[in-house]
Image (spheres, rainbow, N blue to C red):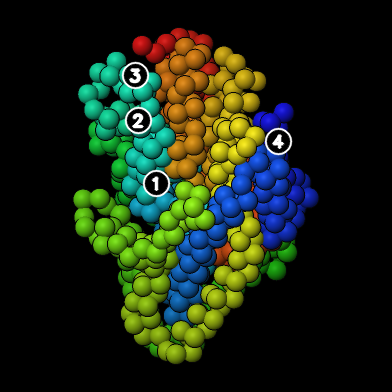
């Protein structure tokens, strides 16, 4: 019964957003009240702890809104400088086919940004870029969410493994014993071992993501609503997939969990772009495009309009191709150098911190590191672009004004979304004696599945990411649980942790606050349910395929008993 109650906040989100298609600004306040009510009256968590968790959630909300504002500001700055028009022309020179463009921008460039920064940043960069190139806003958001699957486990230079799995498992006696029996020698070797298994699963399951991405474009946003038009580019889609996943897997095996997504995407871009320019592996016929703009459905368009005329009022001079792309190169470079542990910059940026320790004496901390957030990178690069593109005051003023208005529209949904998540996560220690809601839910799933549990292990990881908005947090919550279930049912527990991490990555495609953030960047606030209705199909494919692989390996005896 308690497992069903723990599932209720998630169920409410699904029913209201996906079922009734309510905007997140109306659905998430209801979900927050449900989570808070369960915490107070069923779990009997003290009021002070619920309040502290809510305040921590508001702190995270401020961070997300800061990132959203920065991303929108960069888009608007490049729009008013005329740089977006130049970038669009450059992509047309690579390929006028939208199927090719979405693979290059979302799958490859998005994976690179994920590898560098993580935490929803790929959508904040790629979604507005696609809108600027002429994609419908809804199509851009769907594409930006779909690719937040394969690269996510190694996002932010390996954070979901190096922090999520690490903190989830570290210090447990059973885990330490198992590591010693494996003869891996040290903890870092164990994490790399798990990370390599995660990569292998992603290489298998993620192979189809570029093709699915294209099929979604042609089926939901094409003039003919055709699946066949998407499948027609299968040679190029699979080529682009392997161009990323093969080096991704090799990097995970030889270098560890920090760089698979980052280096895999860079190598993929270097391989795929020349092939696309030459039109290789593409079907004969006219390049595929969206219908003319007047024929777009109303729900496809967001509140951010991008005029692609090169002579915008904000620009004082014609922007060259290199100068147009330079801000995005700056974004990529700054994200990478500010997150590499081998360099001192991360420590310097994190040193500026605002922290409220043990809010209301509950042990819950809230902190803000403004300089380390990707939003700061976006704002700095926007200011550089103003000088680089010699923008005038009118253009700068318009860019900042539009950015503030668009960000404000997202604030209502996020103000309730993230506090709901934090209340859900901090329901331990109540007078009722129950474990926190995620663990109660996990126990219920495991009890229901029995020895078939590997089939559902990725689904549980996905639920964690759906609620928490982070593969890292999902791994922190459930890695030890998954490890223990593996030991209990007699299978290799490291594979169970790997299935958890893969499922947690898949959960990012339906994560509520990532969808809210990505939608807000292009002014699509209120259409979050439509996004999730589509991306849910990708989550089901990803989590269940990974689960089937785990289950089949179990039945074949390839997941042997531990110890």
Q: Is residue 251 left or right of residue 205?
A: left
Marking on residue 171? 2
The residue where tag 1 is placed is: 155
Marking on residue 5? 4
Viewer-side label of 4, 1: 4
Q: Is residue 427 left or right of residue 35?
A: left
Answer yes or no: is residue 96 visible: no
The residue where tag 3 is placed is: 178
Taking depth in this image into account, of 348 and 428 the one nearest to the observer is 428
Q: Position of residue 423 (x, y in %)?
A: 59, 48
Residue 85 in the image: above or below residue 423: below
Characterize the local packing of mark 2: few (<14), some (14-19) or many (20 or more) Cα atoms within 10 angstroms. Answer: few
**Helix, strand or loop at mark 4:** helix
**Helix, strand or loop at mark 2:** loop
Identify the mark nearer the N-term, 3 or 4. Answer: 4
Q: Position of residue 200 (x, y in %)?
A: 39, 29
Identify the mark nearer the N-term, 4 or 1. Answer: 4
Identify the mark nearer the N-term, 3 or 2. Answer: 2
């Amino acid at each position: 019964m308690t497992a069903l109650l723990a599932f209720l906040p998630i169920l409410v989100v699904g029913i209201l957003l996906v079922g009734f298609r309510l905007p997140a600004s109306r659905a998430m306040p209801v979900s927050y009240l449900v989570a808070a009510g369960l915490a107070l009256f069923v779990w009997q968590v003290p009021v002070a702890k619920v309040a502290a968790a809510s305040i921590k959630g508001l702190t995270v909300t401020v961070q997300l809104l800061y990132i959203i504002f920065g991303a929108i500001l960069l888009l608007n700055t490049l729009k008013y400088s005329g740089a977006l028009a130049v970038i669009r022309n450059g992509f047309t020179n690579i390929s006028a086919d939208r199927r090719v463009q979405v693979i290059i921008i979302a799958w490859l460039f998005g994976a690179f940004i994920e590898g560098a920064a993580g935490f929803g940043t790929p959508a904040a960069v790629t979604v507005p870029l696609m809108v600027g190139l002429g994609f419908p806003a809804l199509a851009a958001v769907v594409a930006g969410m779909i690719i937040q699957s394969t690269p996510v486990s190694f996002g932010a230079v390996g954070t979901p493994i190096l922090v999520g799995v690490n903190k989830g498992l570290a210090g447990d006696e059973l885990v330490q014993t198992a590591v010693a029996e494996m003869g891996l020698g040290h903890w870092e070797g164990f994490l790399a071992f798990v990370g390599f298994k995660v990569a292998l699963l992603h290489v298998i399951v993620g192979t189809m993501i570029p093709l699915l991405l294209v099929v979604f474009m042609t089926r939901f946003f094409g003039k003919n609503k055709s699946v066949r038009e998407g499948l027609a580019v299968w040679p190029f889609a699979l080529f682009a997939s392997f161009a990323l996943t093969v080096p991704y897997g090799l990097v995970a095996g030889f270098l560890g969990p920090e760089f698979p997504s980052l280096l895999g995407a860079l190598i993929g871009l270097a391989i795929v772009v020349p092939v696309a320019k030459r039109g290789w592996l593409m079907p004969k016929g006219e390049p595929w495009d969206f219908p003319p703009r007047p024929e777009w459905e109303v729900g496809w368009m967001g509140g951010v309009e991008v005029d692609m005329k090169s002579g915008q009022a904000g620009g004082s001079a014609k922007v060259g191709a290199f100068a147009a792309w330079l801000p995005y190169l700056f974004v990529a470079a700054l994200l990478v150098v500010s997150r590499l542990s081998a360099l001192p910059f991360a420590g310097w940026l994190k040193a500026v911190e605002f922290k409220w320790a043990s809010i209301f004496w509950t042990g819950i901390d809230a902190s803000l590191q403004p300089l380390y957030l990707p939003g700061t990178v976006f704002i700095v690069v926007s200011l550089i672009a103003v000088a680089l593109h010699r923008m005038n005051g009118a253009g700068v003023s318009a860019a900042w004004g539009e950015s503030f208005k668009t960000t404000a529209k997202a604030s209502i949904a996020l103000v309730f979304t993230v506090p709901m998540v934090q209340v859900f996560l901090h329901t331990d220690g109540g007078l009722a004696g129950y474990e926190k809601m995620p663990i109660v839910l996990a126990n219920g799933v495991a009890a229901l599945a029995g020895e078939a549990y590997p089939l559902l292990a990725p689904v549980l990881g996905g639920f964690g990411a759906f609620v928490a908005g982070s593969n890292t947090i999902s791994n922190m919550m459930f890695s030890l649980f998954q490890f223990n279930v593996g030991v209990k049912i007699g299978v290799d527990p490291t594979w169970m942790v790997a299935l958890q991490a893969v499922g947690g990555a898949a959960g990012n495609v339906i994560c509520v606050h990532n969808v809210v953030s990505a939608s807000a960047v292009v002014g699509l606030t209120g259409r979050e349910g439509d996004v999730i209705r589509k991306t849910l199909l990708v989550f089901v494919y990803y989590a269940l395929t990974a689960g089937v692989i785990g289950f089949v390996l179990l039945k074949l005896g390839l997941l042997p008993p531990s110890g």
